Amino acid sequence: MTRAIKRIRRRTSERLEPYGITPGQGRALRALAHAPGCELPDRAMRLSDLADRLHIAPRSATTVVDALEEAGLVERSPDPADRRAVRILLTEAGRAAVERIGQVRHEVAQEYFGEVSPADQDVLLRVLRAAETRYAAATPPRRPGPPGAAR
């Protein structure tokens, strides 16, 4: 599994390179896109929540968001409920980038698993989903570390 994951990640990264999207930026874009209300300034994800979701230090999240903002994929917006907080909004270009990432990931997975029969693919997905369900049910929620600590 580790070998498969590494190969798929490497190929996906190579395919996204011409678009200027790094793996870390791709993770951040996907996290933002899947957040409820990501397109609404007053409900968009806070920078600190993005750092928590990505399991990285807030300073690292700031660096990722700086690059995404410079590329026109996100915009910062003040949080109306907290003057100190910043919310991150996906731009139209950011939504298009999320679609592109999804397409590239799908293509790479199809290439990797293309020679595997559909029946075997179904079995593999069923086993992985069952393992994930059991693991998630048995694992206590992750506790955030102290502010500013690397995760």
Image (spheres, helix red, strand yellow):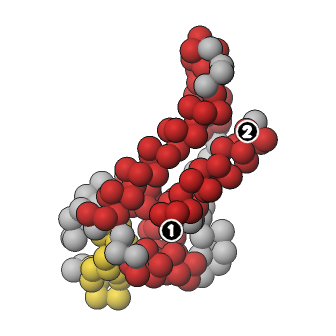
Which of 59 and 124 lies nearest the eye of the viewer? 124
Mark 2 vs mark 1, foreground winner is 1
105 or 129: nearer the eye?
Answer: 105
Question: Dot 1, how many residues are within 10 Å of its Cα: few (below 14), some (14-19), or many (20+)?
Answer: few
Above or below, 54 relative to 65: above
Residue 6 shows in this picture: yes
Residue 106 located left or right of residue 12: left
Q: Secondary structure at mark 2?
A: helix
Disc 2: CA contacts within 10 A as few (<14), some (14-19) or many (>=20): few
Q: Which mark is residue 56?
A: none
Residue at the spot x=30%, y=54% of the render?
36
Q: Position of residue 133 (x, y in %)?
A: 58, 31
Rendered image quadrant of residue 96:
bottom left
At x 52%, y 63%, the residue is 18
- Residue 126 place in picture, x, y as percent: 58, 20
Identity, as a three-letter code, of the amino acid under mark 1:
Gly
> Left or right: 90 with respect to 9?
left
What residue does disc 2 label?
4
Location of mark 1 (residue): 20
Q: Is residue 131 above or below residue 35?
A: above
Amino acid at pointer 2:
Ala
The residue lying furthest to the top in this view is: 119
Q: CA distance from mark 2 to mark 1?
A: 24 Å
Residue displayed at 32% across by 58% down: 95
Specify the quadrant that holds the C terminus: bottom right
Figure quadrant of residue 148: bottom right
Residue 11 on image: x %, y %: 65, 49
Image spot of residue 5 (x, y percent)? 70, 43
Name the residue rendered at 35%, 82% in the picture. Answer: 85
Numbered disc total: 2
Q: Is residue 8 above or below residue 148?
A: above
State which quarter of the image contains the N terminus: top right
